[in-house]
Image (cartoon, rainbow, N blue to C red):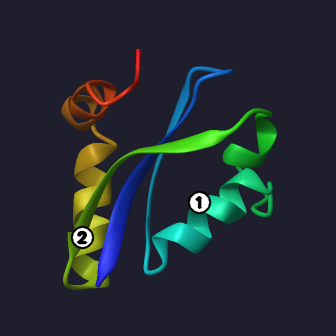
Amino acid sequence: MFHIYCIYNKKNNKIYIGQTKDLENRLELHNQKTFKGFTSRFDGEWILIYSEEVESRIDALKREKQLKSFRGREFVKNFIPR
C-alpha cells in the first residue's frame, strides 16, 4: 500500500503534498529536516492534515499529481486547521 499525504507548516503557512510507502517514517523525516528540498527550508513543525491509501505506486503518483493541481490544492486547503 502507498500513501498520498498532505502536510502543513502553520508557522510558515506552507503545504507539501507527497507520496510514500511508510507514512509515519516520512513525517518524521520531514520534521527532522532530513530531505534537502522544500520542507527542509522552513522551520516549524510539519503536521499531517490529509492522507489517502492506494494499491500501487502508479496510483499514488497519479493522485499526487491531481492533488497538486489547482482544484486539488483547493480541496487540500479545506483540511488546514484554523
Residue 49 x/y as whole percent? 39, 41
Question: Where is residue 72, by image quadrant?
Answer: top left
**Mark 2 Cα shell of 10 Å, populated few (<14), some (14-19), many (≥20):** some
- Could you tell me the amino acid type at mark 2? Glu
Residue 71 x/y as whole percent? 19, 31
Q: Which residue is drawn at 47% across and 69% down?
A: 23
Q: In this view, does 20 lie to the left or right of 25?
A: left
Asked whether disc 1 touches disc 2, contact meaning CB atoms under 8 Å apart, the reply is no
Q: Residue furthest top?
A: 82
Nearest the eye: 82 or 61: 82
Residue 1 x/y as whole percent? 28, 85
The C terminus - image quarter: top left
Is 27 above or below relative to 42? below
Name the mark on residue 6: none
Find disc 1 in the rendering and name its residue. Answer: 27
Q: In this view, does 36 lie to the left or right of 62?
A: right
- Could you tell me the amino acid type at mark 1? Leu
